Amino acid sequence: MPEFREVSCRVNGENRSFVVDPMMPLLHVLRETLGLMATRFGCGEGTCGSCTVMVDGQAVMSCDLPAGEVAGKRVETAEGLDGDPPHPLVAAFLDHQAGQCGYCLPGILMAARALLEGESTPPSRARIAEALDGNLCRCGVHARILDAVEDAARHMIRR
Amino acid sequence: MTVDAPPPPLTDAPLMRDWIDISPAGGVTFLSGRVELGQGNSTALLMMVADELGVSSDAVTLETARTDRTPNEGFTAGSMSISFGGQALRCAASALLVQMLDAAGERLGCPPQELRVEDGEILRHGVSTGLELLDFVAAADLSCRVADLARPKAGGERWKTFRDMPRIDLKERLVGAPFVHDMAAPDMLHGAPVHPPSLHSALVSLDLDALMARPGVVEVVRDGSFVGVVADSPLASARAAEWAAKNGTWEATRIEAIDPVEVIAGSTADAETVVETGDVNRNIGRWYETTVTRPYIFHGSIGPAAAVAVWEGDEATVWTHSQGVFQLRKAMAMALRTAEEKLRVIHSPGAGCYGHNGADDVAFDALLMARAVPGRQVKVVWSRHDEFRAAPMGAAMATRVRALLGPDNVLTAVDVMVNSAPHTSRPGAGGTPNLRAAAYLENPIRPARSPDVPAARGGGADRNAAPTYKVDAVRVQRRLVHDLPYRSSALRSLGAHNNVIAIESLMDDIANDIGLPPLDFRLQHMTDQRSRDVLERIAVETREAREVSLPEGAGWGLGFARYKGTGGYCAVMVRIEVDGDVRVTDAFAVADVGEAVSPDGVKNQVEGGMLQSISWTLKEAVQVDGSSTTSKSWADYPILKFSEVPRVSVELVERPGAFPLGAGEISQGPTGAAVCNAVRAALGIRVRNLPITRGAIIAAANA
């Protein structure tokens, strides 16, 4: 039987502690233990990006990241973008109506946020596309998503 | 009623109460049998009723697709939500408006003809009366027939106060948890199926006691060759199911490795003539011919199929992202040999399905597993591997087109033969449940031979096999190939993707051969003004981009079709560059879908169809071995990535007041065709076997 352990980290700015099998993928802790369902299960093997979250500012796929590895770290999920006013990325996605089914979108938001927060000047469209290559979209909303991220970049990066 | 013919959904659901519910507090809910699949139709339907009533869209609510409440509108498929479902709802809203304005007229002592509604307020001769329309809901008599009262606004009267509206559900999809996958309940359990590796294998042995002892397992269900594991967490059920798959043994009917496309293309099964106008057996002129094939294609939802089920006594409730809740209920009842009334099926959003994927199968899996733990909700989310091996696929096809070019470079005959696996095995098609697990229960019901989709509903294999051009003699035959060991069903646009590619490839080949610009050659065979309009407009939209000189290995291609011959018109031009792989750099479309309820929503659908079609056409092929698919993960089945996406531009030919024609499936055929024709233009090589990978180009060059 796995050995359970207490893991403490910051999730969307709040201190959270949970007792889990530290080898359990972070995705399941977020969804089942913490009830943060915006991070989605898509493949469970790190090939689609639906479960992308940020850990200490980096975009990572939470479906194959052991929960024990986020101890003491900052975890950000799409729920954290739902403010009033909403985060510039959410506002831009709404402006551009950059979505159809939306299953992939929270993961894409987090991959985009990690990119934009790490840049000092708005990245090129090609660079944004490259940063999103690990995130699959099947509805074919890619072009709108790139438009939205470019737009958000202009709001988030003003130097 | 002032509309000539009531929309078809009103035949089976004629009463106002079929479409409208009024709460004791006076809240108005419109009821639609259409499901939101991510295409934005619930927003468009809400806009249509709000526009008809003259109220804001948040003044009323919309409830969709549940067997205990909404009308049965069949499957939400074939781009008919707005054309039929929306028109029916608009009529229902109109009937309600008539009753409310009658009551308002009585109160004001004036004939209702003097009244109209703007932003929820009743105006008399255009002047405020101080009365709100929705204060008159008590006057509604929902036992009336919609068609007796409805006088829906004519084209010019619509959309006076608002035009287009953002999706009502997008925010929640961005940062919330709207999916059936996200349902939660305090004592919810989690199920995972252990499907046999193929439709042709049976479970021989599996140590159920050992499975029961795996971590977190609460119950194990075995019925024939179906095994389900119910556990206390999704991860525990998934891991136990993986253990079972490794430790069980299944016996498969041995099926030799085959190339499905070869089998389909070479089939000599009986052919059925579905279109015959004039006699194609003529000889004056020159015959041209091409055959285009495509492999099986995955629907490829990003979220695997999911459902939640709970049994209370001998009755059950299922939450599902199926395209047809009533049809699923009937199929599940048939498979369980129980009465339909015992089952309640409620739509809940899933990831985009793009047709008939595993949504219905997983709902039945959940129902089977939940039966073992009465009173507790069981959520089942398929694994990625389940999604790729157990769900129906888009059919492999081979379309042969022959065309006779007569005197004056006029096409006088087109003869099309479509060989294809069937394009529908939806629940109930052919009179069997067509739910995967039903095929291997102790008392199995194997799927019947698919009848494919009848021509009256746009055809399946033969969809868009008749060209959208004026030609004297046209014959279309379809040859359904049933003897492949795979399951295929509706994938967006059905046969239209491959058929339009085949026809448009040949149109280009002929134009090139006689030295005419492809666009001109098409226009010469068009008498229909709306077709001409989209083609002429695409030339204008792309003119500037086409004036830029092309580097070596680059080219432009054109594709056009009117979907199903009766739906939306779409012309597409793409620019590609080939450097080993084909890359689409620019994609333009012009579409005419009649009245666009939400122009931006239409553009989004057309765009999505284009990008999905580029992915199918350039990249996608399901790998098979014997009776199983061997593509197990996204790593084995690459689809279009962000860095491979072109610049996209979609323009609409606006037709206010024209019958809405649907948008979700109009661009796949034309886009695939445009890509193929661009490859021909760039390289001088006609690639006839999809997908157009590096290897396919080399093979075509050496052929």
Image (cartoon, coloured by chain):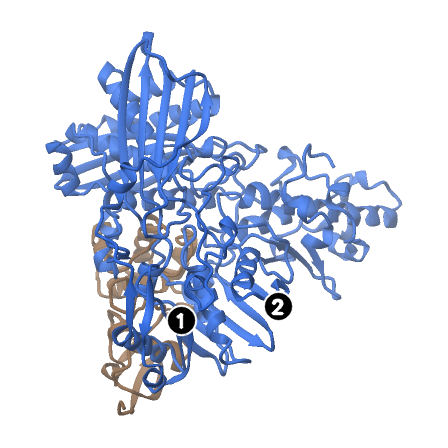
Residue A10 seen in the current view: yes
Chain bearing tag 2 is: B
As drawn, is B362 to the left or to the right of B417? right
Q: Position of residue B654 (x, y in %)?
A: 50, 32
Of the numbered discs in the image, which one, if any, rests on residue B597?
Answer: none
Q: What chain is colored blue? A: B
Q: Residue at x 80, y 53 (%)?
A: B141
Instruction: Identify the residue under disc 1.
Output: A79
Q: Which residue is mark 2?
A: B342
**B182 or B589: nearer the eye?**
B182
Label 2 and label 1: CA atoms lie apart by 38 Å
Q: Residues within 10 Å of mark 2 (few under 14, many from 20)?
A: some
Q: Please identify which colour was used for chain A in the image.
A: brown
The N terminus of chain B: image quadrant: top right
Q: Is residue A133 above or below residue B93?
A: below
Q: Is residue B684 above or below residue B173?
A: above
Q: Give the residue type at disc 2.
A: Lys
Q: Does B193 sit above or below residue B493?
A: below
Q: Residue at x 27, y 56 (%)?
A: B629
Residue count near mark 1 (Cα–Cα under 10 Å), binned few <14, some 14–19, many ≥20:
some
Dot 1 amino acid type? Glu
Q: Secondary structure at mark 1?
A: helix
Q: Looking at the picture, how far across and down is residue B687, in whole percent? A: 20, 34
Q: Nearer the viewer, residue B384 or B1?
A: B384
Residue B51 appears in which quarter of the rendering?
A: top right
**Which residue is found at the position 63% from the left and 33% from the top?**
B156
